[in-house]
Image (cartoon, grey):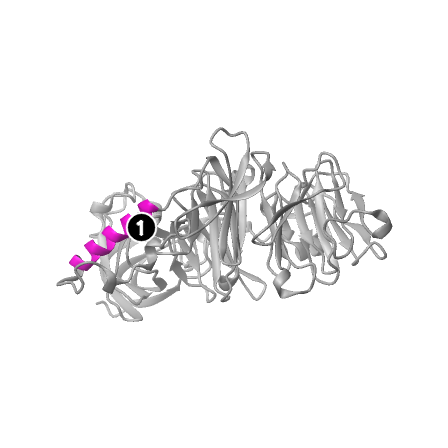
Amino acid sequence: MASNTSVITIPLTGGLNVAVSDQMIKPGECTELINYELTTTGRYQRIKGYERFDGQPAPSEIIGADLPGFPFATFDDFLAAYRAERTLRTDAIQPVPGSGPVLGVFRFNDVVYAFRNTVDGTAAKMYRSSGTGWQEVTTPALSPDGNYEFIETNFSGSAAAREVIGVDGRNPAFRFNGISFTQITGPITPDQPTHVDVLPSQKLVMSYRGGSFVYSEIGNPAGWSGANGAGEIAVGDEITGIDVQADKATAIFCRNKIFMLYGASEADFQLTAYALNSGAIAGSIQSMGQSIFLDDRGLTKLDRTNQFGDFDSATISQKVQPLLQQRLSSVVASMIVRGKNQYRLFFSDNTGLILTMFGGEVMGFTELRYNFVASCTWSGEDSTGRELLYAGGTNGYVYQLDSGNTFDNVAYTSSFQTGFMAFGKPEDKKRWRKLVIEANSVTRVECQYRLYYDYADPNIPLSDVLIGAGSKWDLSDWDDALWGGASTSWNDEYIDGVSRNLAIYLSHTSDYYPPHIISQFFLHASPRGRRR
């Protein structure tokens, strides 16, 4: 190798950046980053899969020793038996009975519950998961087509008195303790509350169409007597969400305004305008220490709205703003993943965005592309403290997210492409000699990669790696990268190309192997003079 060869280190951090030109993108940031997520140290990790759920044995929980034919003569024999059993388990799991999308899903006392319209679409039913699949729960008659929202709470102080309160914009609110389902008669007609939360002072807060919210008596979510401390406050705009904050504050989100309700009860309640030209899109509001939500200007944290007012500088999503602008009207749901410091936003075209935070700062964004369209989501913990994630689909299935290594028994692809990197010398040619890929994995990993030179200019001579400048999905023209099961390993790929800049594309497809981390690249290059 030439003596003037230098080694360029490219830490893979920063996530997606589709808002600036390539020469403004930092090395390691990506113009495409699909089905990867950022770890809390900023590295790119393949996401886990998802699988359908109804309470029956999970496809991902197969034990090899229980498979017929164990022990197996070869790994291929094991894998064939494993896949066959996984298919049997997947096929046994059924959608929630009825028609249309799943209207809402939540977990309570280690049981998953879901709502869906009846087959004829004239009513809605509630179902519980079980070892034999979905079982109907007896409820009062429910109107169809609700958009359910739930809050787990406790109005008595006793651990045994935990319950779920839910609203859906089509029926009265309800309270459910795992045994009895009781509707709450609200103070407004039609009695169809849209959003809900509970104050630390044990007042139930619910919004209604027309731009007002109500608060109950202390400790009595069914009590609406003004003489006992209940009341109603109008805000003059349709409410899109309610989110309790710290320090006796509750954010009341409207589509184009934000109000803050200070105080614990009617004795000290004070409603103030927090932002007069910023609001929240329904379904996008989540709490990560404080509220994060999507507005027309992008994703915003509540404190930044207070600091910067109604300006673009209040947003935290500038790097992915073009993607968000295209999908403002297609938001369907959101969730937080506490164990990964993530906020996830889902759209009606089966895509989503993952925002990873650390210490209150943005680590970066990546993009989701599932094989189903989400209609609702839920995240929380089971009785052991294990975090669980669920999504209802427009196809009627409930899926457990971040579970297994397939997309519902189908292999899935994770891929990313860096920006075109010139390393501070955009007019100077370089001869690229070797690409070193550093990966972290507990198993064998097979990836396919491709290099693009000078913005994939077809006039640039092709290297042994880049076979044409055509579609990156033409996998038969790619080179392979393979590394073994060491926790950290390097893979050397010898390349030969001359250009001013270079982009690296990498892809991995599997229906078995667990997620890996791509930590960094090392590029060996030598100078070749300035472009004339």
The quarter in which the N terminus is drawn is bottom left
Residue drawn 58% across the image and 43% down it: 148
Q: Is residue 531 left or right of residue 201?
A: left
Percent position of residue 24, x then y: 47, 53
Q: Is residue 86 magenta?
A: yes
Q: Is residue 14 magenta?
A: no
Q: Which residues are magenta?
A: 77-92
Q: Is 209 rendered above or below residue 268?
A: above
Q: Is 389 rendered above or below residue 460?
A: below
Q: Relative to the observer, which residue lies in front, 183 or 479?
A: 183
Label 1 secondary element = helix
- List the residue tagged with mark 1: 89
Asked if residue 258 shows in the view, the reply is: yes
Q: In terms of secondary structure, what is the magenta stretch mainly?
A: helix
Seen as rendered, the residue at the extreme left is 73
Residue drawn 46% across the image and 45% down it: 135
Percent position of residue 393, x then y: 45, 42
Q: Give the class, few, some or many, for how many residues have Cα within 10 Å of label 1's Cα (few <14, many ≥20).
A: some
Q: Relative to the observer, which residue lies in front, 96 or 353?
A: 96
**Count of marks, rendered view:** 1
Residue drawn 35% across the image and 65% down it: 8
Residue 190 falls in which quadrant of the image?
Answer: top right
Amino acid type at image mark 1: Arg
Q: Relative to the observer, which residue lies in front, 484 or 49?
A: 49
Percent position of residue 180, x then y: 60, 50
Residue 141 falls in which quadrant of the image?
Answer: top right
Percent position of residue 220, x then y: 74, 54
Residue drawn 49% across the image and 34% down it: 118
Asked if residue 530 shows in the view, the reply is: no
